[in-house]
Amino acid sequence: MNKKYNCLLLAVLAGNSYLVHSQNKYTNFSDTVFHIKEVVVSSNTKKQIKAFNLDVPAKYVPISTNAIPSKLLEQKGIQDIQEAAKYLPGVRIQTSYGGFQQMSIRGFNSSVIMMDGIRDERSSIDNSYPFPDLSFVESIELLKGPASVLYGQSIVGGVVNVVRKSPEAKRSVDARLSYGSWNKKVATMGMGGKLTGPINYRGVVNFSDADGWRNTQNKRFSGYLALGGNLSEKDAIDVRGGFNRDFYGTEIGLPPNMSKDVYDANTEQLYLKSGEMQPGLDRKARYNNESDFLKNNGWNIMAQYSHQFNDNLKLSDKLAYTNDDINYFGTEELSYLESDDAIYKHYYMQNNKKRYICLDTVQLTFPLRFSHMAETLNNQLELSGKLHTGNVVHNYVGGYAAVAFWRNSFSGYNLGVDVQGPGLYSKVAVNDPHSMGYMTTSFSKVTVMRTYTHGLYLQDLVEFSDKLKVLLAGRYDFFNYQRASAVPKNGIREFDTPDDDAFDKVKTSAFTYRAGVVYLPIPDLSLYASVGSFFKPNRTFYSADNIYVDKNGNVYDAEKNGEVFKPEKGYQIELGSKYNLNEKLQVSANWYYIRKYNIVKTLVAKGGTYTDSNGNEVKSDKAIVGQVGTMDSKGFDVDITYTPVNGLDLIAGYGYTDARTRKLADNMYLSSESLVNKRSTYAPENTFYGYANYTFLKGFLTGLNFHASLTYMDKVVRNQTTGLAFPSYWLTDIGAAYKLHNGITILGNINNLFNKRYYNQSLGSQMVPSMPRNFEVSVSYKL
């Protein structure tokens, strides 16, 4: 195992490839913390980073970041956030049910995606939701580690900020047509330039359609428009809006892997081990019902106004509204037919008896119908600038953030009532799946949720000298979560809003901080250390059927509409360095330790037993729930950018993450800690990527480009109890492009060059095969 780690680390340090930072044009919607400028892949010039909306270089900031610029996304034809995440070390995004993305950073699933510095509040509920295509993206930025002091609750492992294209005065026209494997078709059109007076614009429209390698028939349609400019020497405005209309074929994967050892009934020999997949399954076969669908329709608008009082004082206000509609019906669970009678060819042992199982047929056991309709209103008011106290310079930003998030979640889980039709409980041949009839659906319940958060924050980057910089930041957040139930009208997505006193309520508050010091022994090298905290509100409501245990193991009385559990909290310690040699070599490295505590665990299920202090076994008529869990993550990241000659760029990134469940707080109810020291789910230990890009800059091959990438995803634990995991895998992609003199570029990519068979997602034990070797060719035009 150590050899594997050493080989990966040596590959990074050898400089096979490099990590991209951005060269975007200024956007008023820059990340409150970072506006990472892009290094175009064919350039060796790295521009200044905008940190905390202040005019300081990246090397002054005690925080580690990564960025993927639009150039890399364009070269590889990436329009999906999961594909883009392969180029962010320590990050893993998986897609479930066909279109729901779930993100893990530094071992924690509590991570947030933002757009232009605005939180996507859907991630604060369950961190799983569809994300639009990336046709409008300027760059993708990663801020590593806790960021509650910057963006509030639930940011533990890090935050990804998607920066959209900025309005610009220069006239531009961008068009691209692509065709790929399994009838993939993509058309993108973009324009920009002066609109009227000082106002510039940038617009993009994108449409994609594909049969898909597993015949999911995905279709995506999106549009984006940005308007902005300087109204005067001191006043600027930036308005942006976008929409998406996306359809995904839901994805339930292949028939389930074996839950227990399975034997041949005739020979009594072991046929399949627990966790194994049936041999001979068709990886392209889909077992979904014809009625399955996932639709995601959304739109958003953001507006920012800023006023520059003088060189040292600026006021800005950013207001954003988002409307999102997720509508889903999926077959989901497949189950084999079983019997106590010897009527099938195979069996497994259950309670010392044979349970016979049919491996030739699966039944559509549990279709799931739900819909989430959400609205978010977000406002950020900030004052920033510079303040001099003697020879010390203070780069400060202070502000107030307010978020209102409303979500109505409809569900129709009553089979035979909410879900009906000939397809319900239908049986499908394993080796020749065909739909056995449609299903109709309705809704029987709606959960009405309202979240209100308010945050006050202040950050100060203090420059004591050319060599010593200190960062101090603090934030106080107030969190109010409310929930009530209602009945939909006529089974559709309409209902009467409950009265205010019908809502259960949870209120909490938390203070978070970040402090760091940066030392520059020479101008090209910065060394830093920082410590920061985070919090995640607990959304648990009081129930008379529960017994509650605090973090010290003591039973306490909870109250209705009170704070049942304190927020999950924790901290990160980080040490790092950044080095830049003549703009040809940039290296950054960091080590971190993150600890999270106040995790809620069910200690004893209702009707379960525990041993009391006298050694007697006691049966509990209530569930016993305690805030006794802890986990931690430790690791390091290394990023290298190397440009040995003009036209050749090499990029590499490696991340090591060791995230585990730790000891539970002592309490009288828990006698077993079977999960202690087990690896966290969906947190790969090692991730790596390398990217090489070469463009001919002279001679008869001028304009010809070759690029290749190598990515590695380590084993990913799916279930802590059983140890089931996705195996590790390497992927190799190659591509070439040729730029003609008339602005036309012809580009081609081959992905998964060596046709690696791998799995990156599942629905329970139903594995979803990932895409084999595939190609995409495109023709683009730029003016």
Image: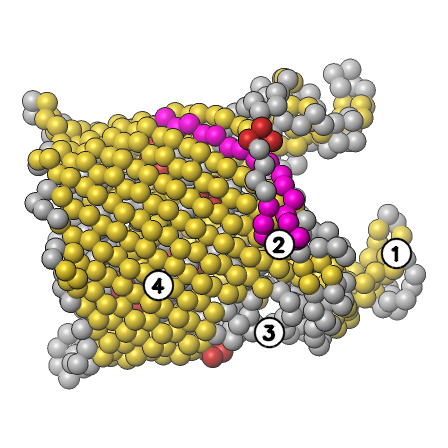
Identify the disc placed on residue 223.
4
Q: Which amino acid, mark 3?
A: Lys
- Depth check, mark 1 against mark 4: the one in front is 4
> Is label 3 in a helix, a strand or a loop?
loop
- Name the quadrant containing residue 475: top left
For image coordinates 25% across by 39% down, the residue present is 317
> Taking 353 as reference, is 473 left or right?
left
- Name the quadrant containing residue 740: bottom left
Which residue lies under the disc numbered 1? 354
> Is label 4 in a helix, a strand or a loop?
strand
Name the foreground residue: 82 vs 53: 53
Asked if the residue at tag 1 contacts the one at tag 3, i.e. Cβ–Cβ closer than 8 Å, the answer is no
Q: Quadrant of the C terminus?
A: bottom left
Q: Which residue lies furthest to the right in this view?
A: 341
Which residue lies under the disc numbered 2? 492
Residue 481: in magenta span: yes
User: In the rendered structure, which segment of residues is drawn in magenta?
Assistant: 476-495
